[in-house]
Image (spheres, rainbow, N blue to C red):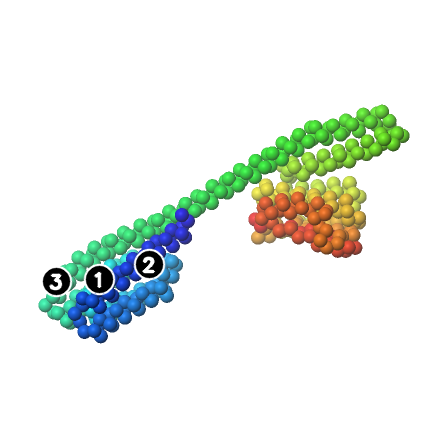
């Protein structure tokens, strides 16, 4: 049970208890009390006012647990209605079974003890006016019941607060366990990606390299069109295998920071594509969770790869911004862009999936002959 749910559960039980006491005392006052009808009506009206006050303001103050001026005002108003009820029909003093616990739920313990004593003194005060000969007995009863009710109410309130605190701690423990499980899951994913990258490098990439080497040794000039086609196909697949290794392995982040890794990717892009690419870092760089850094680096790689393959651009820009809320990556080019609705056709579906795993937002803007801008925001 969550801490908030535990508090709500106790509040529902308190609502039921308060309602039962109020209804029982009001009914008994109307049926068995011997005072004039108008006095009984006034007493029942005061009880009804207490119930309305509880629904309108008391429950909210108990939920807030603020013990401030607003809670004290509500408590004093409850006591005022209680005084009116007891003065009109002393039988309603049984409301103390609800009033005393209510006091300690609304105000500080020390203030609650003072108000509880005053509430218990209402009965002897009324007896002093109506039946002076019973004042001593009523005062003795008030002392005994007051002490018992204060002790019991303080104990109950502490039990409730300890239970709510325990619920909050359980919430924090569950959240910590969930975070540990998530981090373990992410670590497993990256370990598996590293294993796959190693397997691809050691098998497919080396195999394609061997094929190219053997074919070029057989026909160095590539005069045979079939051999030339086989070499081109092997080279293309070798490039794809290397791209897969780069996409699966976060090795670039193992020996460098994220800004440095992005700069290396931009430099490699410029070397391979012959298109100048600038990198600008704003804000104060800081260490980020590995999953976040990997997603940002892969996004920069994918965006630059799209520029090389599709944009026909003459320049590209990468901007990495750190702020208090997260990290913002922008990759833009001055190429031919794309028609609206065709973004996923440029290999961005996988990027969107990775971004969603770190709760980020990916947006792509592109118009024909207007270049393309890829923006990625990741909260941290």
Q: Looking at the rendering, which quadrant does residue 37 occupy?
A: bottom left
Percent position (x, y) of residue 196? 64, 32
Report the residue at 65% width, 36% height from top: 249
Report the residue at 53% width, 41% height from top: 182
Q: Are marks 2 and 3 in contact (CB under 8 Å)?
A: no
- SS of the residue at dot 2? helix
Sequence-wise first label, 2 or 3? 2
On the question of residue 90 being in view, the answer is no
Q: From mark 3 to mark 1, how far is it between C-alphas? A: 16 Å
**Residue that extends furthest to the right in the rendered view of this protein:** 223
Percent position (x, y) of residue 368? 77, 55
Residue 137, which numbered label?
A: 3
Sequence-wise first label, 1 or 2? 2
Q: From mark 1 to mark 2, how far is it between C-alphas? A: 17 Å
Report the residue at 76% width, 29% height from top: 209
Residue 291, which numbered label?
A: none
Percent position (x, y) of residue 110? 28, 58
> Which residue position holds label 1?
94
Q: Nearer the viewer, residue 249 or 15?
A: 15
Q: Nearer the viewer, residue 252 or 164?
A: 164
> Which residue position holds label 2?
15
Report the residue at 66% width, 52% height from top: 363
Q: Classify 10 Å Cα crowding around label 3: few (below 14), some (14-19), many (20 and above).
A: few
For the residues carrying marks 3 and 1, which lies nearer the camera in this image? Answer: 1
């Amino acid at each position: 049970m969550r801490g908030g749910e535990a508090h709500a559960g106790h509040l529902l039980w308190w609502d039921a208890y308060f309602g039962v006491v109020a209804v029982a005392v009001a009914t008994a006052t109307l049926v068995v009390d011997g005072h004039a009808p108008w006095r009984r009506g006034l007493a029942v009206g005061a009880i009804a006012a207490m119930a309305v006050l509880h629904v309108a303001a008391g429950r909210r103050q108990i939920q807030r647990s603020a013990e401030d001026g607003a809670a004290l005002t509500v408590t004093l108003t409850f006591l005022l209605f209680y005084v009116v009820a007891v003065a009109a029909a002393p039988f309603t003093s049984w409301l103390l079974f609800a009033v005393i616990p209510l006091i300690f739920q609304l105000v500080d313990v020390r203030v609650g003890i003072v108000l509880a004593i005053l509430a218990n003194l209402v009965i002897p005060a009324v007896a002093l006016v109506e039946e002076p000969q019973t004042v001593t007995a009523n005062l003795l009863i008030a002392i005994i019941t007051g002490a018992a009710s204060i002790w019991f109410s303080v104990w109950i309130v502490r039990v409730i607060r300890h239970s709510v605190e325990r619920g909050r701690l359980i919430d924090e423990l569950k959240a910590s366990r969930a975070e540990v499980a998530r981090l373990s899951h992410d670590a497993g994913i990256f370990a598996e990606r590293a294993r796959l990258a190693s397997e691809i490098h050691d098998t497919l990439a080396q195999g394609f390299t061997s094929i190219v080497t053997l074919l070029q040794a057989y026909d160095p000039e590539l005069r045979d069109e079939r051999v030339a086609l086989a070499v081109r196909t092997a080279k293309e697949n070798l490039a794809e295998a290397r791209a897969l290794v780069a996409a699966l392995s976060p090795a670039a982040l193992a020996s460098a920071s994220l800004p440095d890794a992005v700069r290396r990717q931009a430099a490699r892009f410029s070397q391979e594509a012959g298109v100048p690419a600038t990198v600008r870092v704003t804000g104060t760089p800081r260490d980020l969770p590995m999953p976040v850094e990997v997603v940002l680096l892969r996004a920069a790689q994918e965006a630059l790869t799209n520029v090389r393959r599709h944009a026909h651009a003459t320049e590209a820009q990468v901007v990495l911004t750190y702020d208090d809320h997260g990290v913002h990556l922008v990759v833009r080019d001055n190429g031919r862009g794309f028609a609206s609705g065709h973004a996923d056709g440029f290999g961005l579906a996988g990027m969107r999936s990775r971004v969603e795993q770190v709760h980020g937002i990916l947006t792509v803007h592109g118009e024909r002959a207007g270049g393309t801008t890829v923006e990625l925001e990741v909260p941290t």
